Image (tube, rainbow, N blue to C red):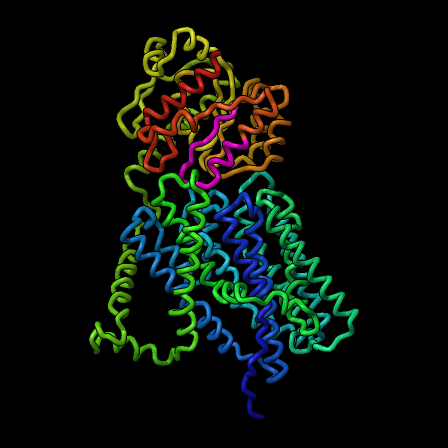
């Protein structure tokens, strides 16, 4: 019997509405993190949609032909996804090569891992953090999710065939897949460690596949092509009610569920996937009203371009924000500009790349390439051809010649300084446990010149503009400084003025990691009665996280140093949070590093965050003024 031609499935426009909600959540999670705390949950919504739709189509094909054209499936997926991805990688690589060469490092690895759909594991292997938004800026960070989907596309046709051939019964297949989703969710909970960076569980295919397979499982018991439009009124009310609960639940999670909440990894993301599945279920059902309710011109437009919108979000944010000197003080303006740029680029991608190449016959690709060399490059019919070739060649040059794990001289100087200061940090902790008061006369190479550290009172007075009384008080002052790379970069200066201080600072440290680490310091005898916390450079924190830290430090004198991160949206949120908490609790004291340093660009390295020699001296002076009163 001849194989029947694959039927075109019913287009369900309401799915574009769900896609719109998901992609807008993701975009505004990055552009307006305070207003859309849970926008990252748009990704599991996308996963559920993907799992449901590909399985629903496979079920139709299996019912029609009693087999799956696996090669055809791969070709369709590649034609749908690859052209826009390749265009993004080429255009972004071109921009990096010409305009932002500081991002060339590891570009080759990013490109090949993205093309092979293993970027999530590549990022994990290279220690990249999705949640460290300061030191891990990359225009390709978001491609991890495409890798998870790509890996699922690779294995799912075979899993599908095995299930329908050997398990057969649809309800049993549903239970088997549901059990596998539970195992994946349990693995997420087991591998997640509160207070530590959750990137491994956030990126891992094994810990994220439950969303995809939940959609697939539901397609076995809720195939769109078997659902009837004519259903009892009561059934319609039930379906519409379920949809309302699912949509409201998703919106609440998208708005309020912070990525720093432990609940996310202990079932929260699984619940979001269930809600997404229910919303998809009522949307694809022709007897419910949700397909109509989620269909409108705006949702249709955004939904059809959601892939391009997702692809171009990070390149726009990273490239644009690198050119803006004070993003934090004009958040709404820059958010609007970036949103317009993202939509504009996605429109170009949709109109000139995704749609045309989805219909392109790839059997003619060699012929097309040959024509580039046998016909004039400049023509009225194809004016884009020469610029496209030049952009591609420049991008390929950048990709091929890009260094791996290399940094420039400025970054190397900073890293050398950090390494030296890490030794001092360990020394302060070791000396605190042995009650040693020795200081170090040492010379450390820093960015401007060789900085000499001394234990001579007169030298310290002159260097830090302090009185003799202040220096003598500082040399006897015991406190713990708990901070991130800004504090770490200043550790040698702090140790010079405060030889009895314990400094515990790490590059990339986030506020949510604090309590377990403070407990460790306490157990070691390194948590003094006075504690200075210098965090917020790498991301914001919640009121609950702040209160948790203060509860643990109850009875101690606590100072917070606010932040200067003009290139990041969270700067003002962090500083406002600290100011508000200090108003509510008179025991909390805030040292205003932001106000002191705001008009002094020369105090900072090119990143405008980490202090230079002058900045480190001023930072230490601020600390000395407060702690020696």
Specify the quadrant of the image occupied by residue 22: bottom right
Q: Nearer the viewer, residue 45 or 599?
A: 599
Query: Which residue occupies 52% across, 76% down?
Result: 70
Q: Nearer the viewer, residue 380 or 127?
A: 380
- What range of the chain is rendered magenta? 560-577
Query: Which residue occupies 59% across, 75% down?
Result: 57
Specify the quadrant of the image occupied by residue 528: top right
Q: Nearer the viewer, residue 571 or 336?
A: 336
Q: Nearer the viewer, residue 34 or 264?
A: 34
Q: Position of residue 470 (x, y in %)?
A: 43, 10
Specify the quadrant of the image occupied by residue 361: bottom left
Q: Position of residue 224 (x, y in %)?
A: 65, 74
* For residue 592, side relative to residue 526 (left or right): left
Q: Residue furthest bottom?
A: 1
* For residue 289, side relative to residue 396 (left or right): right
Q: Determine if residue 134 is in view.
A: no
Query: Which residue occupies 61% across, 23% down?
Result: 585
Q: Determine if residue 160 is in view.
A: yes
* For residue 351, side relative to residue 385 (left or right): right
Q: Position of residue 157 (x, y in %)?
A: 56, 72
Q: Residue furthest top?
A: 469
Q: Position of residue 453 (x, y in %)?
A: 34, 18
Quadrant for the N terminus in the image? bottom right
Assess whether residue 141 is covered by the magenta stretch. no
């Amino acid at each position: 019997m001849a194989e029947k031609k694959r039927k075109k499935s019913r287009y369900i426009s309401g799915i574009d509405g769900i896609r719109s909600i998901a992609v807008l959540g993701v975009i505004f999670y990055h552009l307006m993190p305070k207003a859309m705390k849970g926008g990252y949950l748009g990704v599991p919504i996308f996963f559920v949609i993907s799992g449901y739709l590909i399985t629903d189509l496979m079920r139709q094909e299996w019912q029609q032909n009693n087999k799956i054209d696996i090669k055809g499936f791969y070709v369709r997926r590649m034609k749908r996804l690859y052209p826009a991805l390749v265009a993004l990688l080429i255009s972004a690589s071109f921009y990096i090569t010409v305009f932002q060469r500081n991002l060339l490092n590891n570009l080759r690895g990013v490109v090949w891992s993205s093309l092979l759909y293993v970027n999530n594991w590549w990022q994990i292997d290279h220690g990249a953090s999705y949640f460290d938004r300061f030191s891990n800026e990359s225009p390709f960070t978001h491609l991890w999710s495409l890798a998870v989907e790509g890996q699922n596309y690779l294995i799912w046709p075979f899993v599908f065939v095995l299930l329908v051939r050997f398990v057969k019964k649809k309800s049993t297949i549903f239970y088997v897949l549901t059990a596998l989703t539970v195992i994946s969710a349990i693995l997420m909970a087991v591998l997640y460690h509160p207070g530590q960076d959750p990137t491994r569980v956030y990126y891992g295919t094994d810990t994220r596949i439950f969303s995809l397979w939940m959609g697939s499982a539901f397609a076995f018991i809720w195939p769109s092509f078997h659902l009837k439009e004519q259903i009892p009124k009561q059934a319609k009310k039930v379906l519409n009610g379920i949809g309302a609960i699912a949509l409201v639940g998703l919106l609440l999670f998208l708005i309020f569920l912070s990525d720093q909440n432990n609940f996310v990894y202990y079932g929260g993301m699984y619940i979001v996937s269930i809600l997404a599945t229910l919303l998809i279920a009522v949307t694809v059902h022709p007897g419910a009203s949700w397909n109509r309710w989620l269909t409108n011109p705006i949702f249709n437009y955004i939904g059809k371009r959601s892939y391009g919108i997702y692809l171009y979000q990070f390149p726009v944010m990273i490239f644009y924000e690198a050119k803006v000197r004070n993003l934090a003080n004009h958040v709404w303006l820059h958010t609007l500009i970036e949103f317009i740029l993202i939509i504009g680029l996605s429109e170009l991608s949709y109109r000139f790349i995704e749609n045309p190449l989805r219909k392109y016959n790839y059997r003619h690709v060699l012929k097309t390439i040959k024509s580039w060399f046998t016909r004039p490059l400049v023509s009225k019919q194809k004016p884009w051809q020469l610029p496209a070739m030049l952009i591609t060649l420049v991008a390929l040059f950048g990709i091929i010649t890009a260094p791996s794990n290399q940094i420039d001289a400025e970054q190397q100087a900073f890293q050398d300084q950090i390494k030296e200061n890490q030794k001092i940090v360990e020394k302060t902790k070791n000396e605190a446990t042995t009650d040693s008061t020795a200081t170090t006369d040492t010379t450390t190479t820093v960015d401007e010149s060789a900085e000499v550290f001394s234990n001579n009172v007169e030298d310290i007075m002159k260097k830090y503009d302090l009185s003799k009384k202040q220096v003598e008080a500082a040399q006897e002052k015991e406190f713990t400084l708990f901070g991130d790379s800004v504090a770490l970069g200043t550790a040698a200066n702090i140790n010079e003025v405060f030889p009895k201080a314990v400094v515990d600072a790490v590059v990339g440290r986030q506020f949510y990691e604090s309590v377990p680490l403070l407990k460790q310091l306490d157990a070691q005898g390194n948590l003094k009665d006075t504690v200075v916390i210098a965090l917020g450079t790498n991301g914001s924190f919640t009121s609950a996280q702040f209160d948790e830290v203060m509860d643990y430090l109850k009875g101690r004198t606590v100072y917070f140093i606010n932040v200067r991160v003009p290139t990041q949206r969270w700067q003002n949120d962090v500083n406002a949070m600290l100011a508000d908490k200090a108003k509510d609790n008179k025991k909390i004291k805030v040292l205003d590093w932001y106000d002191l340093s705001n008009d002094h660009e020369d105090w900072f390295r090119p990143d405008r965050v980490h202090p230079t020699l002058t900045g480190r001296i001023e930072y230490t002076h601020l600390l000395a003024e407060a702690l020696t009163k």
